[in-house]
Amino acid sequence: MVTNPYNKHLIDSSIQLLQHGDVVVRTGNDITSEMFKQANQTDKTYSHCGIVMIEDGKPYVYHCIGGEDNPDEVLRRDSIQFWVSPANNTGFGILRYRFSPSQLDSFCNITKTYYSQQKKFDMDFDLQNDDKLYCAELLYIAINKALNKPAIQTTQAVGYNYVAIDNITRNAYCQMICEVKYK
C-alpha cells in the first residue's frame, strides 16, 4: 500500500480556496525556520509569510526571503505550488484580511511597487525604513498602509522592536481560512 504523507489532495484543495490578496504563512523544515518560529510571542507555528496575487488565473506568492534560498536577496514572486512545497515545509495556512475593495487594491499595489523596485531582503530586520524588507515587515507596511491605521502591532523582545509572523496572523483584521499540516 502506498501512503501519501503530504496529503496532496488536501494541499490542492486548500490552494483552490485562495483569493487575490490573501496572506499565506508556512512552516519551513530547517533550522532557520525554527529560529523564526521562536520569535513569535503567542503562536510559534509559522516562520514565513507572503501575499497571494492571482495573475492570469494562477496564484503567485510575493515574499521577502534571504539566505541560500534566495542568493540575490530580491523580493520574490513564486508559484503557490513551489511556495508550499512539502519538500521544504511542514505545513501552511491561508489568512484573509477584511479589506474593502479599495483597501485590497492598495494592499496589492504597495506589494507590486516594492516588487518592481526589487527590494532586497533586510538582514538587519530594521523597521525604521523600507529600503530593505523582511517577510513580516512587507506585510506590516502593506496592511497598515492599506487600512490607513496601525492594524499590525510590533513585538518587543530583548531590546528589539520587530514584526513576527504571529503579529500578522493573530489580530482582529483577519481570519484563518485553512491550515494544512503535512505529517
Image: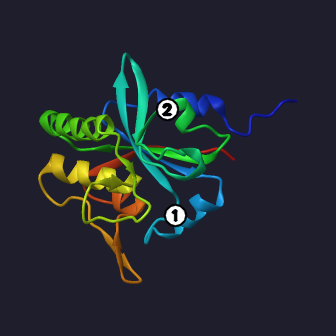
* Label placed on residue 12: none
21 over 181 or under it: above or below? above
Q: Which sits earlier in the primary sequence, circle 1 or circle 2?
A: 1
Residue 180 visible in the displayed image:
no
SS at mark 2 in the image: helix
For mark 2, does the 10 Å Cα neighbourhood hold few (<14), some (14 to 19), or many (20 or more) residues?
some
The coloring applied to the image is rainbow
Residue ID for mark 2: 80
* Quarter occupied by the N terminus: top right
Is 4 on the left or on the right of 170, as rendered?
right
Residue that extends furthest to the top in the rendered view of this protein: 56
Q: Nearer the viewer, residue 71 or 95?
A: 71
Q: Is residue 1 visible?
A: yes
SS for tag 1?
helix
Residue 11 quadrant: top right
The amino acid at mark 2 is Ile
Q: Residue furthest right?
A: 1
**Residue at screen point 57% across, 58% down:** 33
Foreground of the two, 101 or 163:
163
Q: Position of residue 112 (x, y in %)?
A: 28, 35
Mark 1 sits on what residue?
36
Near mark 1 (Cα within 10 A), the count class, few <14, some 14-19 or many ≥20, is: some
Q: Is residue 108 left or right of residue 103?
A: right
Question: Where's residue 32, x and y in %?
Answer: 59, 60
Residue name at image x 65 percent, y 53 percent: 29
In whole angstroms, how far apart are the C-alphas of marks 1 and 2? 21 Å
Amino acid type of the residue tagged 1 in the rendering? Phe
The residue lying toward the viewer, choosing from 53 and 118, is 118
Coordinates of residue 88 in the picture (x, y in percent): 64, 44
Query: Could you tell me how many numbered marks the image carries?
Result: 2
